[in-house]
Image (spheres, rainbow, N blue to C red):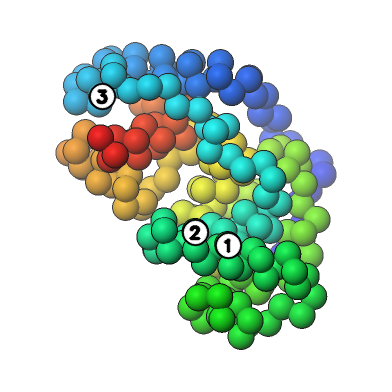
Amino acid sequence: MKKISQKSNAPVKLRMPGDLQAKKAHAFLLAASKKQKHDSFYRFMQTADTISVETRVDASLSLKYFLVKTIIGQQVSVKAAQSIWLKVKTVLDDSQSGITLDLLREQGLSKPKASYILGIIQNKDIKEARLDDLKKLSLEELSQFFLQLKGVGPWTLGVVRMFYIQDTDVFLEGDLGINKALEHFFNTKRYTGQHYSPFRTYLCLYLWKSLKN
């Protein structure tokens, strides 16, 4: 697996405080939806409470644990994923050495997911990766780093960018919830939110939020 370069030429992404950024993103999405005449989404944004990315970030998780938790959550219900995650985390916390495929499967994982997770926890590059270095990488570099991992595809990479690296401009293509909201507001699943850049991560958050309403 390619190691993270310490000399990336990608610009460093400067971040403003979470509350200020959330308010700016809400105002931007509201203005953009009005400008583009996305009337249904504009009406929703008029009444939607401000959402912060930071409130959805678990800063206590290492990259290894974040990837494990995200892989567990692929294509299963939130309730089932949380139950399995808690079991797997307990095993990882208590047995940093001696983790086996069978031990992971005993926690409720399918054989493929257990194999993916075993690969993640044994990967030296993931263990040594620093968040500050990841934030400096371009999308191409991040793709080269993560997509070589079994069990990590474009959707999982998007989740990493959103909720671990905290990139504000990620659109999670192929997500079932996003697709459902797209059909409701934009009458298509193919829209990629280009009119809402550089706050497409927030666009996704509001689209998910709309499903609860």
Q: Calculate the distance from the C-alpha at mark 1 to the C-alpha at mark 3.
A: 35 Å
Question: Which one is earlier in the sequence, the residue at label 3 or at label 2?
Answer: 3
Residue appearing at x 66%, y 57% in the figure: 65
Q: Is residue 132 visible?
A: yes
Q: Quadrant of residue 36?
A: top left
- In this rendering, position of residue 116 left or right of residue 187: right
The residue at which mark 3 appears reads as 44
Residue identified by numbered label 2: 82
Going by the numbered disc 3, the residue's amino acid type is Phe
Location of residue 198 with respect to 139 vertically, above or below: above
Q: Which residue is mark 1?
A: 86
Which marked residue is nearer to the observer: mark 1 or mark 3?
1
Query: Does 25 sit above or below residue 156?
Result: above
Figure quadrant of the N terminus: bottom right
Marks 1 and 2 close (CB-CB < 8 Å): yes
- Going by the numbered disc 2, the residue's amino acid type is Gln
- Residue 68 lies, in percent from the top left, at 60, 62
At x 49%, y 59%, the residue is: 82
Residue found 20% across the figure and 42% down from its top: 183
Residue 130 at what x, y percent from top left?
Answer: 77, 46
- Residue 115 in sight from this viewpoint: no
Residue 154 is situated, as x and y percent measured from the top left of the image, at: 48, 55
Q: Secondary structure at mark 2?
A: helix
Q: Residue at x 33, y 44 (%)?
A: 178
> For mark 1, does the 10 Å Cα neighbourhood hold few (<14), some (14 to 19), or many (20 or more) residues?
few
Q: Secondary structure at mark 1?
A: helix
Mark 3 vs mark 2: in front: 2
Quarter in which the C terminus is drawn: top left
